[in-house]
Image (cartoon, rainbow, N blue to C red):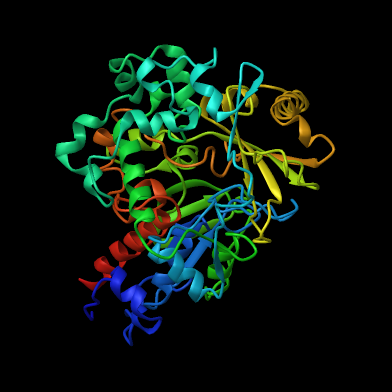
Amino acid sequence: MRKFSLFNRRRFLQSSAALIGASTLPPVSWASNSTDVIVIGAGLSGLYAAQLLEQVGLSVKVLEGRDRIGGRLHTLNDVPGAPEAGGQTIGPNYGRMIYVAQKAGVSLHNVNFRLGNEPVRQLIHAGGERILPAEWATSPYNPFPQAYKTTLPDRLLNQVIGSPPLVAGNAWLKPEFAELDYPVARLFKTKGFNQAAIDIAGISNNYGPTLEEASLLFLHRNNAIVTQSMSTPGGVKIAKGGNQRVPEGMAKMLKTGIRLNSAVTQIRHASEGYMVKCADNSQHNARYVIAAVPFSTLRHVDLQLDLPAIQQEAIEQLAYGKVFQAHFAVEQPFWEGKGFLPNVWSDSIIERVFASDPSNTGKITNLTVWINGKGADLVAQLPPKEAEKQILSAFYEALPEAKGAVRFVTTYSWDSQTMSRGSFATWRPGQINRYAHVMATPAGDLHFAGEHTARWSSGMEGALESGERAANEIIAKLSR
């Protein structure tokens, strides 16, 4: 069998021809009615792995449980402005993402973070009252220690944890940083913060339901990636028409169509390779399988396999974020001339409100209520109509001028989506040290992909990195 050199990022980014050169692998010698590789999941990681495997001559079948392509990239096309429910932005350091968008024929444009000319960029809503940033230091609702009284609530978390002691890349997995895999709340307590202040800081945390359940090491890792992004030229981008257009474009480039509405229920060994069963009772055979789905989904699949105990534990226990959104369409710019923009940090049920221009019109067209973690859990426990009622009440309490000027359109909960059961991996304290080095190791010819298995990148770029790795693992086996 001809040796095939592994893909690497530099070759990917040099040119389209550099992806595979002129070489292809010989076909796998086994049953002709079977597929070389089954990929479970039509998100970025699964689609990228499928592309790369097809480009070296392997037959690939992609099974997707949803009725759409994109995984956790999901543009809300039915909402005016087409905001993102999933992955929000494409960093300038997302080399693979920029590359695959270009290959798929999807245009990217820079995000304008300076929409509007009002001097106050964000309002504070605490104790049922609206507070200007300049008033926060003396507010009776400010429970911060004296040294932090002037720190705004949305900035407190990063102020306390400080600059990351590691650089972007795989440094977060090095032994010298393992001691940082402890609860963020512990650091706050050493600096004199009471529980009320810790809870306030936790509202702005995207990586765990509370700061007691968030790993300091994981926050440092993500802040290091943000720091890298800010120092990389090119600007933060979004896709024209929505970020979901990128995976849709990738899917069109595959030689075989994607089987939608094919939720996998079982994976087991077959006479040659694996048998993958779907909820519709269809069965699919392949020599190799890539599980490109979150562990929060995979743990609900009947894995009739002898996985290492620590890997099985990771599949069952890895933490995932909870995100609940409420989307509003702006019909009148009610904030103009009022001195503030309609961004809000709140200690109420709404937590945060973000103003945006997802369709790149040059003006604010959308407001998104963004509720994380513990708050998302509380909302999920309410009947839908009651949740909507409480969200609208708090929203208009924070922004009374918005009445009659915005239109509530819809809500979206990632936790309620059976094909994701959460947003992204958030790693509880101790889970990085316990799982990160072993959980993506191939189990026989079952391989794992998804942003949770990425070592160098996060988000969309991490998903693509993981798909690339999983494809390389299979190619390496066939190249020996």
Q: Can residue 34 be seen here?
A: no
Residue 423 drawn above or below residue 94: above
Would residue 447 appear left or right of 282 to someone viewing this image? left
**Residue appearing at x 56%, y 71% in the figure:** 107
Q: Residue furthest bottom?
A: 22
Residue 164 drawn above or below residue 90: above
Q: Give the quadrant of the C terminus.
A: bottom left
- Viewer-closest of 369 and 305: 369
Residue 235 drawn above or below residue 378: below
Would residue 215 appear left or right of 413 to someone viewing this image? left
Q: Give the quadrant of the N terminus.
A: bottom left
Q: Can residue 165 be seen here?
A: yes
How many numbered marks have been drawn onto this rendered protein structure?
Answer: 0
Would residue 155 appear left or right of 392 to someone viewing this image? left
Q: Quadrant of residue 247?
A: bottom right
**Residue appearing at x 69%, y 48% in the figure:** 366
Residue 192 in picture, x, y percent from top left: 33, 14
Would residue 470 appear left or right of 85 to someone viewing this image? left
Q: Quadrant of residue 388?
A: top right
Residue 108 in picture, x, y percent from top left: 54, 67
Q: Residue furthest right?
A: 404
Residue 206 in picture, x, y percent from top left: 47, 35
**Residue appearing at x 54%, y 29% in the figure:** 133
Residue 64 in picture, x, y percent from top left: 56, 55
- Viewer-closest of 82 and 151: 151
Q: Residue furthest left?
A: 176
Q: Quadrant of residue 10?
A: bottom left
